[in-house]
Amino acid sequence: MSAGHIIEGALVLADGSVFEGELVGADHPVSSGEVVFNTALSGYQEIITDPSYAGQLITFTYPHIGNYGVNVDDAESRGVFCRGVIIRELARRHSNYRAEQGLNEFLSMHGLAGIAGIDTRRLTRLLREQGAIPGAFGSLSESELHSHAQQEPGTDGVDLVSTVTTSEPYTVGNGERRIVALDFGIKSTILHHLGSLGTVEVLPATTSAAEILARQPDGVFLSNGPGDPAMLDSIAREISQMVGVVPMFGICLGHQLLGKAVGATTIKLPFGHHGGNHPVKDLTTERIEITSQNHNFAVDPDSFDELEHDVVMTHINLNDGVCQGLEVRGAQCFSVQHHPEAGPGPHDSIYLFDRFAALMDARSSAGKAAR
């Protein structure tokens, strides 16, 4: 934006903290949501279009955003579901051979507001100390923005999956394996990887176990998505009816829901994990992986001890010890909290899709042998 078109605004948090800046993107008097920070150095378009950010204002810790523009191929969903973006400096010009438009134009096109010129280092330190907190930004007075921030419920105790799931089934891929993917806010890159494994039928989040199993899938995938898993008891109950019946693989919210389905509890983290540089240890191989993450909630491994199923933690976050993966032994079900699809990178955990394919193939071979 040129200097002559700068519109001053402010970000105000529910605790009264004020950050001055300039408004970018769509023209909204106020945008509110739960404020979180993402530490990725690139991939801002993939982050903004990730449905798992529904209900949130995304703070980018990297100071210079928008320098390589945006393009259609890098979008992770059909639109944007986050409430707004908070950045230090918006690039005035973009430069990349793949770019089709600038970030500011992209935000305006999707009706998404942003605020630039924010001291994101100070904001990030505050979020690390206090945890994710509701906030509001825009052109209203500071007192009005504060009121909006205080009225914002955040993501705790909120069902956001219903706002992002598909309303109608659709299919991607054309391979021999038959995969059902439950859409809790599924990313395009995940569908790309699943589509390379077989024919994937994507179904609404509330599809019953009976409807899924009637399709005789070789495997069921539980997708990423936004919001509090504690608000999705009915979905968890349907998933529980498929444990041990069909191979299942879950990512992010899908991981949390698989945990709930076998009786584990979930907890909300202080400020969540959002970024592309989180070290995770695969406890089954002792390998350390750098992973992409985006979640506010986690499965509590302390709840595994008294479950009916034999559930073990398979991955652990080396930063804070949070459960990053689980396996239901003897049931051909596993899940991870991080994002192995690498949209954006890194690619260290991509092998998990092959692990899912191996489970489906083993079940198919066993079925043929039984006949």
Image (cartoon, rainbow, N blue to C red):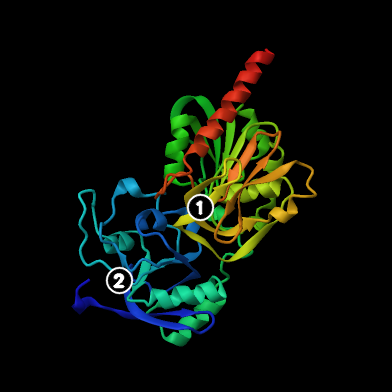
Q: Residues within 10 Å of mark 2 (few under 14, many from 20)?
A: many
Which percent across, then down, holds residue 9?
35, 80
Q: Is residue 130 above or below residue 315?
A: below
Kind of residue at badge 2: Glu
Which percent across, then down, holds residue 256?
63, 51
Which percent across, then down, holds residue 367?
65, 19
Question: In the shown orientation, is residue 117 left or right of residue 337?
Answer: left
The residue under label 2 is 89
* Callout 2 touching callout 1 (CB < 8 Å): no
Quadrant where the N terminus lies?
bottom left
The answer to whether residue 362 of the structure is visible from this angle is: yes
Question: In the shown orientation, is residue 205 left or right of residue 370?
Answer: left
Residue 270's image quarter? Answer: bottom right
The answer to whether residue 237 of the structure is visible from this angle is: no
Badge number at residue 164: 1
Residue 283's image quarter? Answer: top right
Using the image as rendered, state which of residue 202 and residue 198 is in the foreground. Answer: 198
Q: Is residue 154 above or below residue 277?
A: below
Question: In the shown orientation, is residue 318 left or right of residue 369?
Answer: left
For the point 36% across and 49% down, the residue is 75
Using the image as rendered, state which of residue 145 and residue 92 is in the foreground. Answer: 92
For the point 32% across and 76% down, the residue is 117
- SS class of the residue under badge 2? strand
Q: Is residue 314 above or below residue 211?
A: below
Which percent across, then down, holds residue 209?
67, 37
Indicate which disc, 2 or 1, sits on the residue closer to the N terminus: 2
Residue 238's image quarter? Answer: top right
Kind of residue at badge 1: Val
Distance from disc 2 to disc 1, alpha carbons, whole Å, reads 29 Å
Q: Residues within 10 Å of mark 1 (few under 14, many from 20)?
A: many
